[in-house]
Image (cartoon, rainbow, N blue to C red):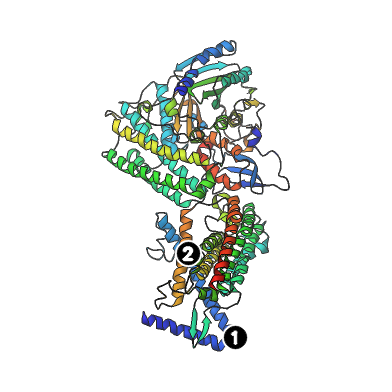
Amino acid sequence: MTHEATQITSPPKPSEMLLHLGPQHPLQPGPFLLDLKIEGETIREAELKIGYIHKGMEKVFEDRTYIQILPLTDRICYLASNSNNDVYCRGMEELLGIEPTDRAKYLRVLTNELCRIQSHLLGIGEYTTDVGFLTMFIYMVRERESVVSLLEAITGSRLNHNYARFGGVAQDLPPGYKEMALKSLGKLKELIKSHDDMMSSDSIYLKRTKGVGTLTAKEAGELGVAGPPLRAAGVNYDLRRLEPYLVYDELDFNVITQTDGDVFSRVKVRLLEILESIYIIEQCLDQMPSGPYKQDVTPYITRPEPGEVYSRIEDPRGEMGMYIISDGSDKPYRFRIRGPAFATAQALPPLLIGTYVADVAAIAASMDSCTSEVDR
Amino acid sequence: MGTFVELYDGIMELLVVLFSTWALAPWVRGVLGGLVIGAVFGGALVMVYLERKFLGDIQSRIGPNRVGGRFGVLQLIADAIKLFTKEDIIPAKADKWLFIGAPIVALTSGFLMVAVIPFDLLVINGKEYAVAVSRMDISILYLEAVSGLAIFAIFMAGWGSGSKYSLLAGFRNVAKMIGYEVPLGISIISVAVMAHSLDIVEIVQAQSTLWYIIAQPLGFVVFFIALLADVGRIPFDQTEAEEELVAGWATEYSGMRWGLAFFAEYLHAVVGAFIITLIFLGGWNGLPLIGNLNIPGIFWLIAKTIMVIMLFIWVRGALPRYRIDQVIDIGWKVLIPLALLNLLWSTIIGLIWA
Amino acid sequence: MGDEQAAIQVIDKTIMIELSDKFPDVVSDVDVPSPNRAIARIDPSKVHEIMQFLLDKGFDHLSCISGVDYPPDKMEVVYHVTSYSGPLVITLKASVPRDDPNIDSLCDIYWNANWYERETYELYGIKFNDCPYLKVLLLVEEMEGEWPLRKDYAGYPNPT
């Protein structure tokens, strides 16, 4: 992999032309510009330009108190808002020297996994429309609705949940939640299996996805991607297993890997991870201890000791990290967001070279990037 | 039912009287042409509505349900009003005449195809009258030729729009159609060989005992797939692949100009469904063994056509899209050999039968 | 599972001792605040060699590069290096002078350093020597030279 692969280095020859996909393009919700130099339908060079919705979050956070930052972490990426809350709260807990209550830990794992399921469902859905499979998209969105309702029952909102708190969570489970969740997830499990079956047996779908956009384990490592694209290449890298946070060390689950590293495997990893997440949630609901779900005194005005922390988490899309430097005041001195989609987006142009224009949509969507998080 | 049949026969008799007395009068042909075009136009509208509802059912959603009662029957009118009142934009970089001409050519090609489609065959006083705007000896050949015009329309739009998405779509369409007109033509020839005629009316009459879908199932499959590609529906809608080329050749069109282009596509699909019904599904003949149950042939024809249209929609709901190189692969490497094999088969059967 | 365990054992805190032994004058203030985190300060002139050493030792994943501004006289470039086979995250901090911040690029060691370096450059004005295509990534091109994440930034256009 050379860096030439990420740039358009020369003007097009007479047999070539530049094709601009974006910033307004149905390829993905969220603006970015993908410049392609194509010869016929074959892509010779590709360049990704980002920053169309740059929100300057890192600067904004330096001017907000710690508790004000909490709801803003939702807005990094709405599909991963629980994970983002959680990674921020875990960082702050380390800085403040507090520990979440046992029940809160389970509740956070529960919401994180629900969040992973709904993110994967929408990710797969967007991807299937990109190969022209509109029906599957609508099925996926339909399935996602039930998961979002489960999240809504806990957190009170369908989007931007803002659930984790320093040392606890915002509220406890509603009564009768376990039965409701088990019923809904049991149904989801059957549906996911049926969709998986439908996708792995459709010959057109297989033709479009097998061997397309292949990323070997070595290349994936070099490109610095994490999450499903990396696991699809066969690398067993999952922070839930590698650096067990919250209560993941007490739960039984498999890290899903595939071997081919192509578009098909990436989607397969997501589908199987949904089933694995359902399994984790079922365990959470079984094992969840009773007790307080938050600290007796929630620290609203927090002045952590000067210090720094790098906390990270297995986001639906990969490794989400936050690097917080405190100088002893009530605002962070430096707040760095290391998003998984940023790394994935960077790895996109090299993957596209040599493929067809029609594959751009399939490959880009199978990487499941999120413009909101890339631009932060 | 009885009165209905009588009424129908009465209307047809009137038509036949018109035919026989005024057969050469241009205005009779004109009126009939207007009626048929109107009917097929209506058919295309019905197809759009059916597609929305039936596809909605497949995708577990409701489809149009606001305008015109809970079944949304007036949604199309609302859409038409919207399209007519929208601003008509011609891009600055467009080749103006090509840009304007493309939807017209597309629609014209659709209407020209309608001209030779027979809807029924009436036998009155021992003479046969086909209910068609024009009856030709070589109507099936003419259909094939005229449907080819639509390719020009898409390429005109692709080049004339001055947009790279449109251009790529135009190229894709030409590449695709070069591959798919051949199996389409060969399947038609197979049918003609078996029926010993190029006239659609005679082809339909030859199927009164045995439908050609049973006599040459391979031919039907090849023709169906090639027709899907011809009318540009999923899995062969590479020319307007939304996630790749925005809206393909129609990207730069707006308002009613887009509406016409969109409509031309549905017109082609409806005419395609008619052709399949006529040359493979027995046209206005009733079911094999059962006969036509005293129901006028035109109803049989329309019922079968609606079934074929439903099949189109079902395919759209169930399949993803091929990539363009795979489409061309299938055309040249699979469909053409199969079509030739079918030609051989139908020639042998046709000889024995004769 | 056996291989995995073995790999995890290689990626542990002993690397910090090795690192200080290998670069005695360059690496300082080594701190291990928690089992999975290690922090050290490094000399900016030797960052290339240190990263190459870490890569050879199995730290094959550059998590992040961040800039931190400490007015009035220094800035820090913070590297988070980790591995695909172990949980240890090494935080390496290199101080650069604020009036002429520059440091060697890591693009030839870690491929994905490219965008992180471009981001740090446009937000802090830290120049990464030999970084291919060092230009603005997220900001509009007119904002090159504004360095908006510096502490004394007062809005666009920046009066300072």
Residue C16 or A30: which is nearer the viewer? Answer: C16
**Res B309 label:** 2
Q: Quadrant of the N terminus of chain B?
A: bottom left
Q: Quadrant of residue A245?
A: top left
Give the residue type at disc 1: Leu
**Res A253 label:** none
Q: Quadrant of residue B142?
A: bottom right
Residue A23: percent from the left, percent from the top?
58, 45
Residue where numbered disc 1 is placed? B24
Residue B42: percent from the left, percent from the top?
49, 70
Chain ID of residue with mark 1: B
Q: Quadrant of the C terminus of chain B?
A: bottom right
Chain ID of residue with mark 2: B
Residue A86: percent from the left, percent from the top?
41, 31
Q: Earlier in the sequence, mark 2 or mark 1?
A: 1
Q: Is B10 positioned to the left or the right of B180 in the image?
A: left
Secondary-structure class at tag 2:
helix
